[in-house]
Amino acid sequence: MSVKIAIEELAGCSGCTIAVLDLHEVLLDVVDKAEIVYSPVIMDVKEPPEGIDIAFVTGAVRNAENQERLEKIRRRAKTLVALGTCACYGGISGLSMLHPNDEIFSYVYREAETVKPDGVIPTDVPPFLYRAFAVGDLTKIDYYITGCPPKEIYLKQIIPALVSGDKLELSRKSVCADCDRKMGPVDNWRLKRRYEGVPDREHCLLGQGYLCLGSVTFGRCAAACPKNNVPCHGCNGPSLDILREPCRDIYSMMVRRIADLTGKPEKEVEKELYDIAHTMYPFTIGSLIMEDKEVSKIRDLVKERSR
Ligand code: SF4
Ligand code: SF4
Ligand code: SF4
Protein backbone atom coordinates (compact mmCIF):
# COMPACT_ATOMS: atom_id res chain seq x y z
CA MET A 1 0.00 0.00 0.00
CA SER A 2 1.41 3.39 -0.93
CA VAL A 3 2.20 6.09 1.63
CA LYS A 4 -0.36 8.93 1.44
CA ILE A 5 1.33 12.33 1.42
CA ALA A 6 -0.20 15.79 1.83
CA ILE A 7 1.34 19.27 1.63
CA GLU A 8 -0.60 22.05 3.35
CA GLU A 9 0.05 25.77 2.74
CA LEU A 10 -0.36 28.37 5.50
CA ALA A 11 1.13 31.90 5.57
CA GLY A 12 4.10 31.50 3.24
CA CYS A 13 5.14 31.92 -0.36
CA SER A 14 4.75 28.29 -1.59
CA GLY A 15 8.52 28.20 -2.16
CA CYS A 16 8.87 25.18 0.12
CA THR A 17 6.44 23.13 -2.01
CA ILE A 18 8.30 24.23 -5.14
CA ALA A 19 11.55 23.10 -3.47
CA VAL A 20 10.03 19.60 -3.14
CA LEU A 21 8.99 19.62 -6.82
CA ASP A 22 12.50 20.76 -7.72
CA LEU A 23 13.81 17.38 -6.57
CA HIS A 24 12.93 16.14 -10.08
CA GLU A 25 14.14 12.55 -10.58
CA VAL A 26 14.49 11.93 -6.81
CA LEU A 27 10.69 12.20 -6.73
CA LEU A 28 10.41 9.34 -9.23
CA ASP A 29 11.80 6.95 -6.60
CA VAL A 30 9.43 8.41 -4.01
CA VAL A 31 6.29 8.10 -6.18
CA ASP A 32 6.91 4.35 -6.48
CA LYS A 33 6.10 4.11 -2.79
CA ALA A 34 3.93 7.18 -2.20
CA GLU A 35 0.97 9.07 -3.55
CA ILE A 36 0.38 12.81 -3.14
CA VAL A 37 -3.27 13.00 -2.08
CA TYR A 38 -3.47 16.71 -1.26
CA SER A 39 -1.44 19.79 -2.19
CA PRO A 40 -3.32 22.99 -3.12
CA VAL A 41 -0.26 24.35 -4.99
CA ILE A 42 0.06 21.45 -7.39
CA MET A 43 -3.43 19.93 -7.65
CA ASP A 44 -7.05 21.04 -7.55
CA VAL A 45 -8.08 19.53 -4.21
CA LYS A 46 -9.65 21.86 -1.68
CA GLU A 47 -9.67 19.77 1.49
CA PRO A 48 -7.22 17.23 2.92
CA PRO A 49 -8.69 13.70 3.03
CA GLU A 50 -8.73 11.48 6.12
CA GLY A 51 -6.00 8.84 6.59
CA ILE A 52 -2.92 10.83 5.52
CA ASP A 53 0.34 9.10 6.46
CA ILE A 54 2.74 12.04 6.19
CA ALA A 55 1.63 15.68 5.98
CA PHE A 56 4.08 18.49 5.35
CA VAL A 57 2.93 21.88 6.52
CA THR A 58 4.56 24.98 5.08
CA GLY A 59 4.14 28.61 6.15
CA ALA A 60 3.45 30.24 9.50
CA VAL A 61 0.12 30.65 11.27
CA ARG A 62 -0.91 34.29 10.85
CA ASN A 63 -4.69 34.25 10.52
CA ALA A 64 -7.72 32.27 11.69
CA GLU A 65 -7.86 30.20 8.49
CA ASN A 66 -4.21 29.14 8.87
CA GLN A 67 -4.98 27.97 12.40
CA GLU A 68 -8.06 26.02 11.31
CA ARG A 69 -6.13 24.34 8.48
CA LEU A 70 -3.27 23.43 10.80
CA GLU A 71 -5.66 21.82 13.29
CA LYS A 72 -7.40 19.87 10.53
CA ILE A 73 -4.22 18.50 8.95
CA ARG A 74 -2.93 17.52 12.42
CA ARG A 75 -6.13 15.51 13.05
CA ARG A 76 -5.94 13.80 9.66
CA ALA A 77 -2.21 12.95 9.48
CA LYS A 78 -0.27 10.29 11.38
CA THR A 79 2.99 12.20 10.99
CA LEU A 80 3.15 15.99 10.72
CA VAL A 81 6.32 17.62 9.40
CA ALA A 82 7.03 21.37 9.60
CA LEU A 83 8.58 22.13 6.21
CA GLY A 84 10.59 25.33 5.89
CA THR A 85 11.59 28.14 8.22
CA CYS A 86 8.15 29.86 8.17
CA ALA A 87 6.58 26.69 9.58
CA CYS A 88 9.47 26.01 11.98
CA TYR A 89 10.04 29.57 13.30
CA GLY A 90 7.42 31.92 11.79
CA GLY A 91 9.85 32.92 9.02
CA ILE A 92 9.34 36.02 6.91
CA SER A 93 5.62 36.07 7.76
CA GLY A 94 6.59 36.86 11.34
CA LEU A 95 7.99 40.24 10.26
CA SER A 96 4.38 41.41 9.86
CA MET A 97 4.33 41.64 13.67
CA LEU A 98 6.39 44.82 13.34
CA HIS A 99 3.33 46.65 11.98
CA PRO A 100 -0.18 47.07 13.38
CA ASN A 101 -2.78 44.94 11.56
CA ASP A 102 -4.75 47.94 10.23
CA GLU A 103 -1.56 49.43 8.74
CA ILE A 104 -0.90 46.16 6.85
CA PHE A 105 -4.46 45.97 5.48
CA SER A 106 -4.42 49.63 4.54
CA TYR A 107 -1.11 49.24 2.69
CA VAL A 108 -2.15 46.08 0.83
CA TYR A 109 -5.62 47.26 -0.22
CA ARG A 110 -5.22 51.04 -0.44
CA GLU A 111 -1.62 52.19 -0.88
CA ALA A 112 0.07 49.46 -2.93
CA GLU A 113 -0.14 49.73 -6.71
CA THR A 114 -3.06 47.63 -7.93
CA VAL A 115 -5.31 47.05 -10.94
CA LYS A 116 -8.32 47.31 -8.61
CA PRO A 117 -7.88 50.72 -7.00
CA ASP A 118 -11.27 51.01 -5.24
CA GLY A 119 -9.59 50.89 -1.80
CA VAL A 120 -12.20 48.51 -0.40
CA ILE A 121 -10.92 46.01 2.14
CA PRO A 122 -12.75 42.73 1.40
CA THR A 123 -14.89 41.46 4.26
CA ASP A 124 -14.14 37.79 3.58
CA VAL A 125 -10.41 38.03 4.38
CA PRO A 126 -9.72 35.73 7.36
CA PRO A 127 -8.99 37.82 10.48
CA PHE A 128 -5.37 38.10 11.64
CA LEU A 129 -4.47 36.46 14.93
CA TYR A 130 -2.87 38.81 17.46
CA ARG A 131 0.58 37.58 16.38
CA ALA A 132 2.31 35.11 14.02
CA PHE A 133 3.05 31.61 15.26
CA ALA A 134 5.38 28.83 14.22
CA VAL A 135 3.30 25.68 13.75
CA GLY A 136 5.00 24.00 16.72
CA ASP A 137 3.75 26.82 18.98
CA LEU A 138 0.20 25.58 18.40
CA THR A 139 0.30 21.85 17.78
CA LYS A 140 2.46 18.74 18.08
CA ILE A 141 5.00 18.44 15.27
CA ASP A 142 6.85 15.19 14.63
CA TYR A 143 9.74 16.49 12.50
CA TYR A 144 11.18 19.87 11.55
CA ILE A 145 12.90 20.61 8.22
CA THR A 146 14.31 24.13 8.23
CA GLY A 147 15.41 26.37 5.35
CA CYS A 148 13.88 29.18 3.34
CA PRO A 149 13.32 27.14 1.32
CA PRO A 150 14.85 23.82 2.51
CA LYS A 151 17.85 23.05 0.32
CA GLU A 152 17.94 20.26 -2.25
CA ILE A 153 21.09 18.59 -0.85
CA TYR A 154 19.18 17.77 2.34
CA LEU A 155 15.64 17.36 1.00
CA LYS A 156 16.79 14.63 -1.38
CA GLN A 157 18.02 12.65 1.63
CA ILE A 158 15.20 13.51 4.04
CA ILE A 159 12.09 12.92 1.89
CA PRO A 160 12.95 9.40 0.66
CA ALA A 161 13.98 8.46 4.24
CA LEU A 162 10.68 9.74 5.67
CA VAL A 163 8.66 7.82 3.08
CA SER A 164 10.62 4.59 3.68
CA GLY A 165 10.62 5.07 7.47
CA ASP A 166 14.45 5.00 7.54
CA LYS A 167 16.50 6.75 10.21
CA LEU A 168 18.87 9.42 8.96
CA GLU A 169 21.89 10.92 10.71
CA LEU A 170 22.48 14.48 9.56
CA SER A 171 24.94 17.11 10.73
CA ARG A 172 23.72 19.17 13.69
CA LYS A 173 26.33 21.89 13.34
CA SER A 174 26.08 25.56 12.45
CA VAL A 175 26.68 27.14 9.03
CA CYS A 176 30.26 28.03 10.10
CA ALA A 177 31.10 24.29 10.27
CA ASP A 178 30.69 24.06 6.47
CA CYS A 179 32.42 27.35 5.68
CA ASP A 180 36.10 27.18 4.78
CA ARG A 181 36.94 30.86 5.22
CA LYS A 182 39.94 31.64 7.41
CA MET A 183 39.87 33.78 10.49
CA GLY A 184 42.32 36.59 9.68
CA PRO A 185 43.64 39.43 11.84
CA VAL A 186 40.85 41.73 12.99
CA ASP A 187 42.09 45.32 13.29
CA ASN A 188 39.96 48.46 13.55
CA TRP A 189 36.82 46.40 13.20
CA ARG A 190 33.71 48.32 12.24
CA LEU A 191 30.35 46.98 11.16
CA LYS A 192 29.79 47.39 7.42
CA ARG A 193 26.58 47.37 5.42
CA ARG A 194 26.44 44.77 2.66
CA TYR A 195 26.77 47.39 -0.07
CA GLU A 196 30.06 48.70 1.35
CA GLY A 197 32.95 47.36 -0.72
CA VAL A 198 33.44 43.78 -1.87
CA PRO A 199 34.47 41.25 0.81
CA ASP A 200 37.67 39.31 0.20
CA ARG A 201 36.93 35.66 -0.61
CA GLU A 202 39.41 34.11 1.77
CA HIS A 203 38.67 35.46 5.23
CA CYS A 204 35.68 35.23 7.55
CA LEU A 205 33.04 37.78 6.55
CA LEU A 206 32.27 38.65 10.16
CA GLY A 207 35.95 39.38 10.76
CA GLN A 208 35.82 41.74 7.77
CA GLY A 209 32.91 43.62 9.38
CA TYR A 210 29.97 42.09 7.49
CA LEU A 211 27.19 40.81 9.71
CA CYS A 212 27.37 37.08 8.95
CA LEU A 213 25.03 34.98 11.16
CA GLY A 214 26.74 31.67 10.28
CA SER A 215 27.78 30.92 13.87
CA VAL A 216 24.21 31.18 15.23
CA THR A 217 22.45 29.50 12.27
CA PHE A 218 21.62 25.81 11.78
CA GLY A 219 23.72 24.34 8.98
CA ARG A 220 21.43 22.88 6.32
CA CYS A 221 22.81 24.56 3.21
CA ALA A 222 26.53 23.68 2.96
CA ALA A 223 27.27 27.36 3.78
CA ALA A 224 25.80 28.39 0.42
CA CYS A 225 25.97 32.16 0.97
CA PRO A 226 29.48 32.60 2.44
CA LYS A 227 30.77 30.30 -0.32
CA ASN A 228 29.35 32.85 -2.78
CA ASN A 229 30.80 35.84 -0.90
CA VAL A 230 27.50 36.79 0.73
CA PRO A 231 27.04 36.91 4.53
CA CYS A 232 24.61 34.40 6.04
CA HIS A 233 21.37 36.11 7.10
CA GLY A 234 20.10 33.13 9.08
CA CYS A 235 17.48 31.56 6.79
CA ASN A 236 17.86 28.07 8.31
CA GLY A 237 16.80 29.33 11.73
CA PRO A 238 18.80 29.16 14.96
CA SER A 239 21.64 26.72 15.61
CA LEU A 240 20.80 23.81 17.96
CA ASP A 241 23.03 25.38 20.56
CA ILE A 242 20.78 28.44 20.69
CA LEU A 243 17.59 26.46 20.44
CA ARG A 244 18.40 24.24 23.39
CA GLU A 245 19.89 26.78 25.81
CA PRO A 246 17.30 29.09 27.39
CA CYS A 247 19.95 31.72 28.14
CA ARG A 248 21.19 31.89 24.53
CA ASP A 249 19.65 33.92 21.77
CA ILE A 250 20.65 35.03 18.25
CA TYR A 251 21.25 38.66 19.26
CA SER A 252 23.06 37.98 22.54
CA MET A 253 25.30 35.34 20.95
CA MET A 254 26.17 37.59 18.00
CA VAL A 255 27.09 40.43 20.37
CA ARG A 256 29.29 38.04 22.36
CA ARG A 257 30.89 36.61 19.22
CA ILE A 258 31.73 40.03 17.79
CA ALA A 259 33.09 41.16 21.18
CA ASP A 260 35.34 38.06 21.38
CA LEU A 261 36.51 38.54 17.81
CA THR A 262 37.30 42.23 18.04
CA GLY A 263 38.17 42.73 21.71
CA LYS A 264 35.47 45.43 21.97
CA PRO A 265 33.27 45.57 25.08
CA GLU A 266 29.80 44.10 24.44
CA LYS A 267 28.14 47.46 25.17
CA GLU A 268 30.14 49.06 22.35
CA VAL A 269 29.28 46.27 19.94
CA GLU A 270 25.59 46.76 20.77
CA LYS A 271 25.84 50.43 19.75
CA GLU A 272 27.07 49.46 16.28
CA LEU A 273 24.24 47.05 15.54
CA TYR A 274 21.34 48.47 13.52
CA ASP A 275 17.80 47.43 12.69
CA ILE A 276 17.98 44.44 15.01
CA ALA A 277 14.54 43.10 14.03
CA HIS A 278 15.50 42.72 10.36
CA THR A 279 19.17 41.78 10.79
CA MET A 280 18.99 39.37 13.74
CA TYR A 281 15.46 37.95 13.74
CA PRO A 282 14.08 38.12 10.17
CA PHE A 283 13.29 34.39 10.21
CA THR A 284 12.50 33.80 13.89
CA ILE A 285 10.53 36.81 15.09
CA GLY A 286 7.26 34.87 14.79
CA SER A 287 8.39 32.02 17.03
CA LEU A 288 7.25 31.76 20.65
CA ILE A 289 10.19 29.49 21.47
CA MET A 290 12.58 32.26 20.40
CA GLU A 291 10.54 35.07 21.92
CA ASP A 292 10.20 33.35 25.31
CA LYS A 293 13.95 33.26 25.90
CA GLU A 294 14.81 35.56 28.76
CA VAL A 295 17.54 37.34 26.76
CA SER A 296 15.50 37.67 23.56
CA LYS A 297 14.85 41.16 22.23
CA ILE A 298 11.85 40.05 20.16
CA ARG A 299 9.19 41.09 22.69
CA ASP A 300 10.53 44.66 22.99
CA LEU A 301 11.07 45.03 19.24
CA VAL A 302 7.50 44.01 18.47
CA LYS A 303 6.09 46.29 21.16
CA GLU A 304 8.18 49.23 19.98
CA ARG A 305 7.49 48.87 16.26
CA SER A 306 3.83 47.83 16.22
CA ARG A 307 2.54 50.79 18.26
S1 SF4 B 1 10.19 29.15 4.39
FE1 SF4 B 1 10.74 30.58 2.75
S2 SF4 B 1 10.31 29.43 0.89
FE2 SF4 B 1 9.19 28.40 2.55
S3 SF4 B 1 7.15 29.34 2.56
FE3 SF4 B 1 8.41 30.50 4.00
S4 SF4 B 1 9.19 32.22 2.78
FE4 SF4 B 1 8.48 30.68 1.34
S1 SF4 C 1 30.88 33.80 10.34
FE1 SF4 C 1 30.25 33.50 8.20
S2 SF4 C 1 32.08 33.82 6.99
FE2 SF4 C 1 32.73 33.56 9.11
S3 SF4 C 1 33.20 31.37 9.25
FE3 SF4 C 1 31.06 31.62 9.88
S4 SF4 C 1 29.85 31.31 8.02
FE4 SF4 C 1 31.97 31.65 7.40
S1 SF4 D 1 24.20 30.59 4.36
FE1 SF4 D 1 22.64 31.34 5.78
S2 SF4 D 1 21.27 32.62 4.55
FE2 SF4 D 1 22.51 31.40 3.13
S3 SF4 D 1 21.27 29.58 2.68
FE3 SF4 D 1 22.60 29.06 4.43
S4 SF4 D 1 21.40 29.55 6.26
FE4 SF4 D 1 20.42 30.56 4.53
Image: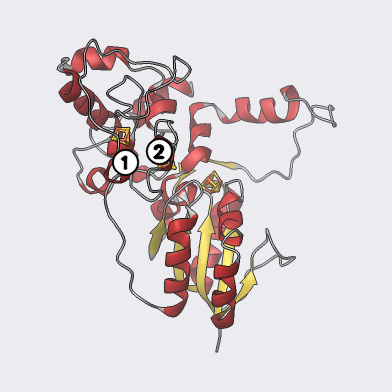
Left/right placement of residue 261 relative to residue 164 reads left
- Measured as percent of width and height from the top left, residue 66 is found at 57, 52
> Closest to the observer: 191 or 205?
205
Reading the image, the residue beneath label 1 is 179
Q: Is mark 1 within 8 Å of ligand 2?
A: yes
Left/right placement of residue 222 relative to residue 59 reads left
Q: Which residue of the protein is positioned furthest toward the top in this rendering? A: 188
Query: Cβ–Cβ below 8 Å for labels 2 and 1?
Result: yes
Q: Amino acid at mark 1?
A: Cys
For marks 2 and 1, the one nearer the N-term is 1
Q: Amino acid at mark 2?
A: Lys
Element at label 1 = loop
- Measured as percent of width and height from the top left, residue 275 is found at 41, 20
Q: Residue at x 73, y 30 (%)?
A: 109
**In the depicted structure, whether residue 130 falls above or below residue 69:** above
CA–CA distance between discs 2 and 1?
7 Å
- Measured as percent of width and height from the top left, residue 205 is found at 33, 27
> Closest to the observer: 184 or 105?
184
Q: Is mark 2 within 8 Å of ligand 3?
A: no
**What is the count of numbered marks?**
2
Crowding at dot 2, Cα within 10 Å, few <14 / some 14-19 / many 20+, comes out as some
Q: Residue at x 59, y 57 (%)?
A: 17
Q: Residue at x 47, y 61 (%)?
A: 155
- Tell me if residue 183 can be seen: yes
Q: Residue at x 43, y 72 (%)?
A: 162
Numbered badge on residue 227: 2
